Amino acid sequence: MRHQDAVLRLCEIPGVRQDALLQMIAELGPAAMAFETAEQMASWMGVCPGREESAGKSNRNRSPKGNRTMRRVLNQVAWSAVRTKDSFFRELYHRLIPRLEVHKAIWAIAHRIAKVVWKVLHEKVRYIERGPLALDPAAMKRRVTRLARQMRRLDYTLELKPVVVATTG
């Protein structure tokens, strides 16, 4: 496949599965070049917070219209991400629940995931898990093995090499 690198980078994000990532690439392109910022892309998708104010009075807080397909995909990805054990998004969701209701917390997670997707596609960076999973090498190895197996089912060839991180000091 032409966009194998983008597919591999997207599948590292918790909650993003094959159908979702292929739909994201189809809608956004392999590098999301149509959008200069993550906020522009989130607004186009319709997952940014909406605010309608007049004379300092808030009338409603609904999100704007946007790409209906991408909104649905991101909503599903957000639900999947908050159910992924030891993910950053799961912990963020549980921190947001006391302040927001469940659906607003999912909406906030979808917004955050949209910004991560833009960064991964546009800047060609890899997603690094910041949750407790990052501290457990055995869990990370299981995740990499599972993702590699899923990609082989989609007829991708993978070459797994550990990333060497240079330390400064």
Image (spheres, rainbow, N blue to C red):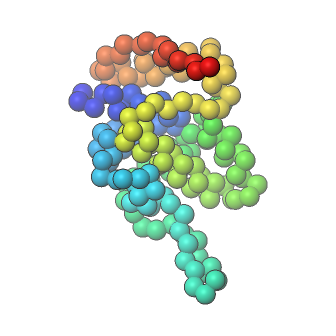
Residue 23 showing in the rendered view: no
Looking at the picture, how far across and down is residue 82, in whole percent?
Answer: 61, 41
Q: Nearer the viewer, residue 78 or 163?
A: 163
Looking at the picture, how far across and down is residue 54, in whole percent?
Answer: 57, 85
Where 105 falls versus 52 (above or below)? above
Looking at the picture, how far across and down is residue 65, in whole percent?
Answer: 42, 67
- Say which quadrant the N terminus sits in: top left
Which residue is painted at 61% across and 41% down in the image?
Answer: 89
Looking at the picture, how far across and down is residue 169, in whole percent?
Answer: 62, 19
**How many dots with numbers?**
0
Which residue is painted at 42% across and 45% down in the image?
Answer: 118
- Residue 104 appears left or right of 143: right
Which residue is painted at 55% across and 72% down in the image?
Answer: 51
* Quarter of the view holding residue 157: top left
* Quarter of the view holding residue 49: bottom right
Where 96 falls versus 88 (above or below)? below
- Residue 148 appears left or right of 35: right
Residue 160 showing in the rendered view: yes
Where 74 falls versus 164 (above or below)? below
